[in-house]
Amino acid sequence: MRVGFDSRPAKETHGIGRYSRCLLAALRDHGRGEIVETHKPRRCDVFHSPWIDGAMLRPSVPQVVTLHDLIPLKRRGEYLRSGLRFRMRYLAVQRAARVIVPTHAVADDAVYQLQIPREKLAVIPEAPASNLGPRDEAEVKAVCKRHGLAERYLLWVGRMTTPDPRKRVAALARARRKMPLVLVGAIHPWAHELPNVTLTGALSDDDLAAVYSGAHALVFPSDDEGFGVPPVEALACGTPVAACDVPAVREVLHGRVSLTSVDDLDGLVAAAECARRPAPPPPAWTWEDAAAATWEVYAQAAAS
């Protein structure tokens, strides 16, 4: 089988970039067919767009689309510009032969919001990158010193290039806390206005693993998510997690993280400050598992 894979998002630093890079590498290693990096799937048996921006209205071959969430559609008032941009993309998703989603929570949204039949949906979870794991004390101290981090700190990881209402980073910065708060991720000038926080910018995977390992806990204040990669990465590095109780996070990490009401950010921070090591391990699912499941989806799409 010859699969055209739109690798354009792989260069991005946020979650979809991580997904595209990790899945693409695992698909190649799994070796069940040929992967061609292209967004113009000529002479291919199947085309996979791992992001909604690459979904095609009239693909020349059966199309598989990964739908990470439907938040712009669910919260139109907060994502007016995104909703308009995605309108034709959502139509392309509806026309796809198969749609991959990371959780059953997103599958439910796809059925309700886009009326996609359940038999066209495949729930394939994500995983931490293989190079994200616990780092030793010497490496943690060196990386923290280089980035000016305190000995004990709370951590948030994400993207701050544009304000995202569901991430609630500004509200987290204003919440009551005793420990310093470190924000990791690509930044926009608005982020420099956040009070009493340390911004590191985007980090290499090695530095990110060390910063995860050195954190007292990860704080995850999102009030809606499709999966929630940072909590899984934090657990892979041995770091406890406090998160808001939203369906996708509960589905992926129930019993592994401390969950608090979305309306209580002070309680979320307090739970993070009370966290204790050792943290539970992340779910056993790997990118190799995801690749095997994705090849099955390709076969189903080709047969359809």
Image (spheres, rainbow, N blue to C red):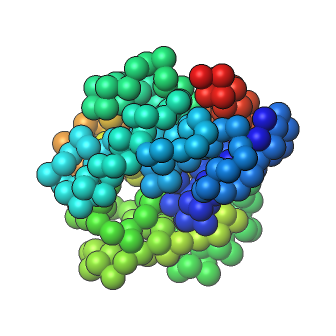
- Pinpoint residue 135: horizontal percent, then vertical percent: 72, 58
- Work out whether residue 225 or residue 10 is closer to the camera in this orientation and state it: 10
| The C terminus, quarter of image | top right
- Pinpoint residue 26: horizontal percent, then vertical percent: 75, 44
Residue drawn 43% across and 19% down?
118
Asked if one can make out residue 249 in the rendered structure from this viewpoint, the answer is no
Asked if one can make out residue 79 in the rendered structure from this viewpoint, the answer is yes
192, above or below 267, in the image: below
Residue drawn 61% across and 55% down?
40
104, above or below 67, in the image: above
- Work out whether residue 279 or residue 76 is closer to the camera in this orientation and state it: 76
14 to the left or right of 18: left
65 to the left or right of 33: left
Name the outermost residue toward the top: 119
Residue drawn 35% across and 41% down?
91
Residue drawn 59% across and 71% down?
203
277, above or below 125, in the image: below
181 to the left or right of 45: left
| The N terminus, quarter of image | top right
48 to the left or right of 254: right
